[in-house]
Image (cartoon, rainbow, N blue to C red):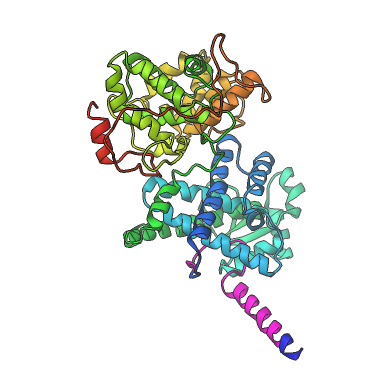
């Protein structure tokens, strides 16, 4: 019994030491990199879960003013749906084993994403902006005692002023509004050179080289400190990244994180397989296809052909909405044979269609492309029709294409505003709302499109209701969802399998299948 008490004491002392030395506060500036050992599975899970939080911060920050009650409410709701809810939403400072693990996961996930997002200036800028917004949100939800503790833990010499000094500051403030509220405001005394943004905005009282900063404005100074530190750290990390190229396990995972789709799975393993037929696609494309898929469809109808990148993007999208393999072959054959004979189509294109459905090569059930993959992949070249119109179209051409959808001039201007700001998925969501009559040009965007198949699914629910199946045009037969793919008798040259991450054919397959490009 005595031995047990001693062991428990040593364990408690060890935990307390971990808190004191590594994680003295639940809110961190991430100065020191972690030195723990974790599995690849945990490595990926931590990265993905934190990325979900940062994506939510970006989306909500675009459509709502930061710091408002509505913004905080929506962000709390999104964070609560992730595995980081206890890390970012809990307000307690209890030094328990669970709290220690939460701080460890917060710490490690930040550094994992720092590795993933240090590879280019655009990625660094995006990561920095979202981490700063996350820090602002978390700091503003801390109570006064926790904030003082955070400042002390990070050697930030910003301390609340004494009661007498606060009374003096209150008397110096001008205006009746200030006089009525100033006595309830907590002030911090900060060297004015560290509060230049607030000085520029005339938000502080200056005296003897110090700025008296209200508690609500202190986060502005902390963000400046954090921005400088994190920006430098990202640059240093990018220089060290080439040393990781020897590790074939981590680099592909890190490179793919910025393109990772984190939403619903739109693979063909769903109950709607076979509900969509080739004859229905023309009608569906006019109302329920996102602009990227509309563009590919129009290009195919005009040229009776699609190049490799467009076939992949469009073919997997059609697979995701429920087009069976037989109907996919029928759909592409019907259009392509207007510019070639059937034998040419079977030899050069049917193999790639069956490959996407897992009937050739590695027999992998490939999933449709998400928006980030479409946006971040190689831009379409001359003759291509794939990609994201909001990202890759010329502004004038995009405006012209949008105007054909019956959107008002005011609505077009709003969509173009989001596009010019680089918020392509928000622009797509606004385009969806305007074309479906669920908002006007001046209303806030209530959703963000993360996946082309999400766009299609939402459109069909609006048009037909969530409980109703997709309407079938008269005379069109619905294929049984349990029907098996027909076995093609045409022979093709055996090639190496596709890369799972990009769904891209190997060079040997490209040479065989796309020598007409």
| Residue 23 located within the stretch drawn in magenta | yes
Residue 405 visible in the snapshot: yes
Q: Nearer the viewer, residue 320 or 33?
A: 320
Q: Residue 272's spot in the image, x, y percent?
A: 57, 28
Answer above or below: position of 65 versus 32.
above
Instruction: Say which residue appears at 36% left-offset and 19% top-offset.
Output: 333
Q: Nearer the viewer, residue 155 or 432?
A: 432
Please identify the quarter of the rendering in which residue 292 is found. top left
> Outermost residue, top direction?
474
Left/right of residue 48 with respect to residue 87 in the rendered view = left
**Which quarter of the rendered picture does the N terminus lie within?**
bottom right
Residue 205 visible in the snapshot: no
Q: Residue 161's spot in the image, x, y percent?
A: 67, 64
Left/right of residue 117 with respect to residue 104 in the rendered view = left
Answer above or below: position of 95 versus 312.
below
Part of the protein shown in magenta: 6-34
| Residue 453 located within the stretch drawn in magenta | no
Q: Residue 450's spot in the image, x, y percent?
A: 52, 35
């Amino acid at each position: 019994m005595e031995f047990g008490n001693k062991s428990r004491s040593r364990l408690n002392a060890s935990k307390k030491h971990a808190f004191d030395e590594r994680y003295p506060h639940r809110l961190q500036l991430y100065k020191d990199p972690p030195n723990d050992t974790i599995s690849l599975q945990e490595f990926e899970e931590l990265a993905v879960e934190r990325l979900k939080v940062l994506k939510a911060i970006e989306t909500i920050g675009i459509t709502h003013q930061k710091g408002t009650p509505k913004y905080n409410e929506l962000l709390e709701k999104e964070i609560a749906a992730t595995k980081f809810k206890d890390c970012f939403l809990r307000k307690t400072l209890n030094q328990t084993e669970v709290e220690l693990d939460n701080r460890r996961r917060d710490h490690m996930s930040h550094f994992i994403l720092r590795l993933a997002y240090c590879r280019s200036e655009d990625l660094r800028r995006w990561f920095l902006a979202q981490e700063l917004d996350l820090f602002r949100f978390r700091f503003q939800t801390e109570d006064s005692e926790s904030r003082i503790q955070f400042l002390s833990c990070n050697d930030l010499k910003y301390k609340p002023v004494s009661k007498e000094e606060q009374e003096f500051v209150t008397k110096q403030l001008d205006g009746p509004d200030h006089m009525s509220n100033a006595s309830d405001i907590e002030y911090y005394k900060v060297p004015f050179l560290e509060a230049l943004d607030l000085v520029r905005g005339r938000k502080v009282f200056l005296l003897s080289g110090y700025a008296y900063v209200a508690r609500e404005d202190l986060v502005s100074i902390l963000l400046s400190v954090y921005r400088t530190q994190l920006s430098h750290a990202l640059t240093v990390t990018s220089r060290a990244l080439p040393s990781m190229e020897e590790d074939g396990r981590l680099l592909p995972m890190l490179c793919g994180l910025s393109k990772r789709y984190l939403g619903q799975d739109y693979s063909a393993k769903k109950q709607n397989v076979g509900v969509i037929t080739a004859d229905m696609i023309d009608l569906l494309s006019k109302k329920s296809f996102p602009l990227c898929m509309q563009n590919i469809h129009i290009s195919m109808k005009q040229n009776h052909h699609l190049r490799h990148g467009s076939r992949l993007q469009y073919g997997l999208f059609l697979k995701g909405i429920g087009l069976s393999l037989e109907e996919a072959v029928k759909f592409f054959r019907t259009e392509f044979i207007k510019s070639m004979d059937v034998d040419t189509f079977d030899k050069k294109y049917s193999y790639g269609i069956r490959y996407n459905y897992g009937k050739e090569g590695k027999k992998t059930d490939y999933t449709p492309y998400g928006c980030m993959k479409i946006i971040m992949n190689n831009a379409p070249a001359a003759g291509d029709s794939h990609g994201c119109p909001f990202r890759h179209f010329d502004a004038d051409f995009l405006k012209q294409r949008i105007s054909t959808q019956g959107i008002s001039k005011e609505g077009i201007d709003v969509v173009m505003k989001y596009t010019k700001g680089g918020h392509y998925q928000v622009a797509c969501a606004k385009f969806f709302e305007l074309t479906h009559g669920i908002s006007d040009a001046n209303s806030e965007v209530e959703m963000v499109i993360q996946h082309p198949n999400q766009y299609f699914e939402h459109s069909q629910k609006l048009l037909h209701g969530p409980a109703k199946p997709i309407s079938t045009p008269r005379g069109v037969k619905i294929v049984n969802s349990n029907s098996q793919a027909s076995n093609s008798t045409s022979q093709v040259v055996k090639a190496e399998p596709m890369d799972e991450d990009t769904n891209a054919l190997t060079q040997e397959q490209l040479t065989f299948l796309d020598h007409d490009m």
